[in-house]
Image: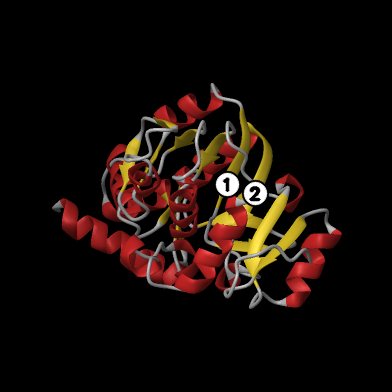
């Protein structure tokens, strides 16, 4: 059986069962665990499933939308969030900025600053600072995850763990008061966790479409989030619950992008 046929059968199994194990797939497809693991890693890298320990999961909450789709969603809200988040940054700060279209918008709002040190695994964030000579840019190593235009993996995490930053800015795919910040992908979650652990403050940038959403893998528990910057379309019940759990909630208005503490 060729790889393409085998991988299609894996996806078919996921659609039926929602989750698969390496052991079960190896028996079903009469091949080795090493081969199945390689197939799952490939399918994970192209966003078809989300790897877990010993297998994979699928479904709407386990699939990443392509970056090109995300960049045209909630554009005004993301820009307002980015403008507000930029006011939290002081010249000379050391910042870790994770991947995402909202963090990319933040980066573009920071290019006029000076003396910043930016550490990122995001290609769009790095590109934003190419013509910003007053700031220092450090890119992590790692393996490209094309669906989010970011570097992930052991090399990424090693780079981040050797850094201490003032603030880490993260986005993610979902933020729920009970579940925390989440993403469909285990490897992406690992990188985001390393970023959060390497800073004094963790600021999550999430527009209203992400509030109350749980995706497959928890990136951070709510208790690990210092601040949230969102827009006025976010559900009040979620904002109240997040605030009660100690998250400092700020709401950006589309007209001004100015601070409104919840």
In the rendered image, the quadrant that contains the C terminus is bottom right
Check residue 203 in the rendering and tell me which mark sits there, or answer none.
2
Q: Are marks 2 and 1 in contact (CB under 8 Å)?
A: yes
Q: Position of residue 92 (x, y in %)?
A: 58, 31
Q: Is 90 on the left-hand or right-hand side of 224?
A: left
Check residue 169 in the rendering and tell me which mark sits there, or answer none.
1
Task: Establish if 37 lies above or below 197.
Answer: below
Q: Residue at x 55, y 24 (%)?
A: 163
Q: Residue furthest toward the right?
A: 244
Q: Position of residue 33 (x, y in %)?
A: 34, 40
Q: Residue at x 55, y 36 (%)?
A: 95
Nearer the observer, 179 or 228: 228
Nearer the observer, 40 or 9: 40
Asked where in the image residue 259 lies, by quadrant, the reply is: bottom right
Q: Residue at x 54, y 58 (%)?
A: 82
Q: Position of residue 94 (x, y in %)?
A: 57, 31
Q: Position of residue 130 (x, y in %)?
A: 32, 39
Task: Establish if 154 lies above or below 112.
Answer: above
Q: CA distance from mark 2 to mark 1?
A: 5 Å
Q: Is 177 on the left-hand or right-hand side of 73?
A: right
Q: How is the image coloured?
A: secondary structure
Q: Count the marks.
A: 2
Q: Residue furthest toward the left?
A: 2
Nearer the observer, 197 or 57: 197
Q: Residue at x 48, y 31 (%)?
A: 157
């Amino acid at each position: 059986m060729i790889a393409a046929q085998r991988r299609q059968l894996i996806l078919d199994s996921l659609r039926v069962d929602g989750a698969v194990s390496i052991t079960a797939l190896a028996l079903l497809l009469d091949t080795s665990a090493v081969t199945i693991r390689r197939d799952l890693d490939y399918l994970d890298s192209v966003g078809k499933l989300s790897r877990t320990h010993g297998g994979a999961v699928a479904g709407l909450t386990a699939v990443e939308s392509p970056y090109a789709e995300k960049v045209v969603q909630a554009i005004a809200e993301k820009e307002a969030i980015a403008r507000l988040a930029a006011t939290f940054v002081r010249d000379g700060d050391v910042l870790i900025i994770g991947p995402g279209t909202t963090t990319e918008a933040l980066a573009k709002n920071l290019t006029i600053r000076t003396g910043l040190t930016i550490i990122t695994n995001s290609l769009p964030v790095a590109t934003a600072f190419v013509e910003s000579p007053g700031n220092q840019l450090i890119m992590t190593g790692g393996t490209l995850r094309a669906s989010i235009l970011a570097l992930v993996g052991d090399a990424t995490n090693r780079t981040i763990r050797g850094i201490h930053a003032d603030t880490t800015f993260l986005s993610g795919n979902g933020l729920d008061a009970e579940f925390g910040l989440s993403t469909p992908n285990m490897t992406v979650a690992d990188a985001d966790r390393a970023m959060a652990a390497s800073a004094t403050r963790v600021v999550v940038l999430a527009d209203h479409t992400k509030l109350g959403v749980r995706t497959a893998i928890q990136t951070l528990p709510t208790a690990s989030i210092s601040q949230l910057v969102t827009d006025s379309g976010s559900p009040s019940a979620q904002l109240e619950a997040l605030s009660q759990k100690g998250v400092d909630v700020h709401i950006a208005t589309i007209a001004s992008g100015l601070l409104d503490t919840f």
